[in-house]
Amino acid sequence: MDVDALCDSEDVIIAGIMQHIEEAGIHSGDSSCVLPAVSIRPETLETAAHYTRKLALALNVVGLVNLQFGIQRDAEGQDHVYVIEVNRAPLGPCLSLEGYRHSARQSRLAADDGPQTARSAPSPACQRPGLGTGTHFYVKSPVFPWSKFAGSIRY
């Protein structure tokens, strides 16, 4: 699971939670994901959001932060949420290229006003809390640069 958030060192806004479609062990940039998460239990999503808030504030994040979580369900059916990594943006709000790319993508998907918002900066996630995707679902799939590898075989 991938969580993108914005923080001003006092408040944390969850910009989006993407569910990885592939099993663990695949790098998030190389995996297909769906937004919003479709088969993660609400209480598990809330745990990830809680961890995101606690970590962003503890790290004094001012700007963007991306967290990756692993979920393991035990024999009793209880989900356990593990932090895999926390990537905080090194610059101020909406200025980190890496962090901006993730939050901008999620906020564009959640925006009501289509292409105009998709091209605007800063990201709408910086301007309004409570983003959702409405009744829409979005899938992110990786694109690999196979043409750059001589002799590569595409399947």
Image (cartoon, rainbow, N blue to C red):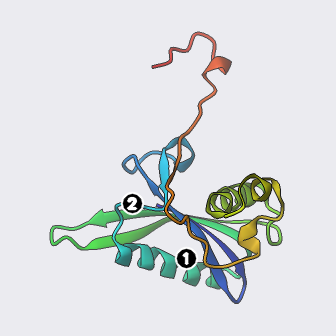
Q: Nearer the viewer, residue 23 or 21?
A: 21
User: Position of 50 compared to 115: left or right?
Assistant: left
- Residue at 39% across, 46% down: 22
| Residue type at the position of mark 2 | Val
Label 1 packing within 10 angstroms: few (<14), some (14-19), many (20+): many
- Disc on the earlier residue, 2 or 1: 2
Q: Secondary structure at mark 2?
A: loop
- Residue at 63% across, 60% down: 106
Q: Nearer the viewer, residue 44 or 89?
A: 44
Residue 33: percent from the left, percent from the top? 48, 50
Residue 96: percent from the left, percent from the top? 79, 61
User: Position of 53 compared to 71: left or right?
Assistant: right
Label 2 packing within 10 angstroms: few (<14), some (14-19), many (20+): few
Return the residue at label 1: 52
Q: Secondary structure at mark 1?
A: helix
Quadrant in the rendering for residue 74? bottom left
Return the residue at label 2: 38
Q: Is 94 drawn above or below residue 137 in the view shown? A: below
Q: Is 50 drawn above or below residue 107 in the view shown? A: below
Q: CA distance from mark 2 to mark 1?
A: 19 Å
- Single out the residue that lies furthest toward the left: 76
Residue 137: percent from the left, percent from the top? 49, 55
Residue 97: percent from the left, percent from the top? 78, 55
| Residue type at the position of mark 1 | Thr
